[in-house]
Amino acid sequence: MKALIVLVLCLQLHRISAAERCQLHHKGENRQFPEDFAFGVSTAAYQIEGGWNVDGKGLSIWDTYTHAHPERILDRTNGDEAAESYHRFEQDLAALKALKVKFYRFSFSWPRLLPNADTTVINQKGIDYYNNIIDKLLANDIEPMVTMFHCDLPEALNKFGGFTNDIIIKYFRFYADFLYKTFGDRVKKWITFNEPFDYCVLGYGRAYFPPLVHSPGVADYLCMDNTLRAHAAAYRSYKAKYFKRQGGKIGITISSRFYYTQRGDKHTIERAMQYSLGWLANPIYSKSGNYPQLVLDDIGNNSLREGLAWSRLPPFSEFWTKIIRGSGDFLGLNYYTSRYAELSQPPIGEVPSWEFDSQLEYTVDEKWKQGNSNWLYCVPQGLEDILKWIRDRYDNVEVFVTENGWSDYGALEDTDRIDFLQAHLQAVLNAINDGCNVTHYSHWSLIDNFEWNMGYTQKYGLYYLNLTSPHKERIAKMSAHYYRTVIESKKYYRY
Ligand code: NOJ
């Protein structure tokens, strides 16, 4: 009996320590990634560039927002200087070379290139800046992977509704056309939008991000609707006009958690997944196209109940369903964390809102280790499971993991980040071994940077950024050395 108690205690302790160290239980002995698997790192323009008002750059909503509302940023900072990558790309390049990454995912600042958002003014200095990045990357055998839009909407567009005005479809199509024409001879991997759910729900639903619109269940849905159409319009024009000559791939990056359930059943998981990943992925990657039926039905019914004569989320017309369906050569996935989901009866949240429509409540497991972001818990199993979910729902579409990362306080001996990285690489490998078509993994982020409303208080970099030094040195953390070893050997190590 005593022995049994000891055994149970040991097992319990083992479980807890695995969670504390943020590990995934090992499956099989294969630690080798396929030969052509590509490792990279990610950044985004507003979070690293600085140079917010130099050389003809126009304003983005993040410039105006951080200037008008310093109190909304935890350390009252902004991206005016950030990592100064606008003036210090050479330092970023040195870090990229040291890591031996195969590709670098970075974003173009739309207002740096087109300060008025349209093609009335084309900023040559902006073109020069990105040309230099692309050329130097290629000269060093690092492939550029470009995000066309990563939160920094031109203020010019915000003046008349931003993502809630469907004229953004036209603006984005012309912006994309300009990008293909100017950079498409060398850029072969394009991501139209980064994390639409986040900039829509936080920017137009909850008024947490700019443009600070509080219109949950309406403007945020409109934003996602227009994003999907703008994405597809840009995809179709590439295929019609540029693909033959340039031969690149285009996708969109969607953020999602995976969901588990304690009290519910598999329908609860399905519901939670359709209200997150499925909302944006179903229209593009499913056979049927359009929004998930479950989501359409809920929101249609709720809208009628609320006294509306139309649904707050109408299905796409036949025309748009066709244009959007199949408009992705790969699915970009940003995966950071997972949740437990349970049905909430009665539904929680404002009426209307995404929370209310989805009828779900989310919790975390106390065993999940927490990072230095209040929403970030280490759940590597979720990455394996979401990849399998994508494989089964969307005909095993090619997946690029475009972001995955861990926040801390900036220590150089970042063993927690190594644990996180190692466990998530294992999750990717497990998924590949189970037939998932994952070909790229990109870690967020190359360097510590401006973490939106959290300012510089949460560090995600493989490289430490000395913010107070005049030279803004990038200093390799222990995780950078670890990642380089993985990249060189295509094998992940137990740390
Ligand atoms: C995803 C976003 O794309 C990126 O901008 C952000 O810094 C990371 N998540 C971490 O929150």
Image (cartoon, grey):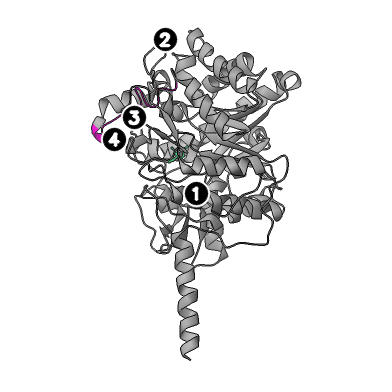
Rendered view: 159 above or below 447: above
Q: Amino acid at mark 1?
A: Ile
The residue where tag 4 is placed is 73
* Tag of residue 467: 3
Q: Amino acid at mark 3?
A: Leu
Name the image quarter holding residue 315.
top right
Using the rendered image of the protein, determine whether residue 167 is visible from the camera's viewpoint: no
Q: CA distance from mark 4 to mark 3?
A: 17 Å
* Tag of residue 55: 2
Q: Amino acid at mark 4?
A: Ile
Of mark 4 and mark 2, the one earlier in the sequence is 2
Q: At which x and y percent is residue 199?
A: 43, 36
The yes-or-no answer for disc 1 within 8 Å of ligand 1 is no
Q: Which residues are magenta?
A: 71-85
Q: Amino acid at mark 2?
A: Asp
Query: Which element carries disc 2, helix, strand or loop?
Result: loop
Query: Which element carries disc 1, helix, strand or loop?
Result: helix
Q: Residue at x 45, y 18 (%)?
A: 111
Q: CA distance from mark 4 to mark 2?
A: 26 Å
Q: Is residue 493 left or right of residue 58?
A: right
Q: CA distance from mark 2 to mark 1?
A: 39 Å
Q: CA distance from mark 3 to mark 2?
A: 23 Å
Of mark 3 and mark 1, the one earlier in the sequence is 1
The residue where tag 1 is placed is 418
Badge 1: how crowded within 10 Å, few (<14), some, or many (20+)?
many
